[in-house]
Image: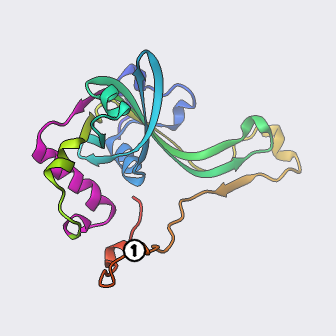
Amino acid sequence: MTDTPPSERTRVKRYHWLAKYDKETIHAIVDASPHAHVGYVHEGRPLVTPTLVWRDGERLYWHGSRVARMIQATSGQEVCLCVSIIDGLVLARSAYNYNINHRSVMVFGVARPVTDPEEKRLQLQRFVDGLIPGQWDRLRPMTEQELAVTALVVLDLGEASAKVRTGPPEDDEADYALPIWAGVIPVGTRIDAPVPDPRNHPDAQMPEDVLKFKLG
């Protein structure tokens, strides 16, 4: 566990006591949510694009069409990537002390294009199998054309920080004597039963791993 940020721009200033800089915490938050937002500059203007990401060791990957604006604008450029998970609404005794229980990660760095076809194929397989184990081998094989038009971007996790809040409200001491209800409303992601495609082949069987799907 470390209390030292990897760089000054990753140092958490607001609610600094919630900051986490250790790899274990950062990895766990990233692994718990495949959904992230990537901030970058395109044609002189700031943009933020939601996308799916996955981790391989100390690297984050995301993919898209090679002609997509986000892919072209982020490849070789400075970006800021954020992952956020809301775990609860924290209702305090004053509006000023309202909060949320959450886990979040912010990553800075230069996003680099992945140009090696074999690395692209292996990482795309890691992405698919990371969601549903063994799914890649059940699918129709990816064609060379599909691989060629799919772009992959990688970002090192070396410059990252996390914020984690848990627990009840933190009110002003005098407010605890007020007859106002306070507490936490838990928030989570619900995963329902799979819904089959109506055009499934009659012989298509749902894999057991699809039924076991979970995040994190």
Q: Quadrant of residue 150?
A: top left
Residue 18 vs 166, above or below: the answer is above
Residue at point 25%, 40% (across, down)? 152
Residue at point 19%, 67% (across, down)? 137
Expressed as whole percent of the image width and height from the top left, the position of residue 63 reads 30, 43
Expressed as whole percent of the image width and height from the top left, the position of residue 185 reads 68, 56
Position of the C terminus, as image quadrant, is bottom left
Q: Mark 1 points at which residue?
A: 199
Query: Is residue 130 in the magenta section?
Result: yes
Residue at point 61%, 57% (across, down)? 187
Q: Is residue 168 visible?
A: no
- Return the residue nearer the eye: 176 or 119: 119
Q: What's drawn in magenta, residue-wise?
A: 110-137
Query: Is residue 98 in the magenta section?
Result: no
- Circle 1 residues within 10 Å: few <14, some 14–19, many ≥20: few
Q: In which quarter of the image is residue 126?
A: bottom left
Residue at point 43%, 15% (across, down)? 44
Expressed as whole percent of the image width and height from the top left, the position of residue 99 reads 67, 42
Expressed as whole percent of the image width and height from the top left, the position of residue 15 reads 57, 32
Residue type, numbered disc 1: Arg
Query: What color scheme is it?
Result: rainbow
- Return the residue nearer the eye: 43 or 35: 43
Residue 99 vs 129, above or below: the answer is above
Q: Does the magenta stretch mainly form a helix, a strand or a loop?
A: helix
Residue 54 vs 137, above or below: the answer is above
Q: Is residue 60 visible?
A: yes
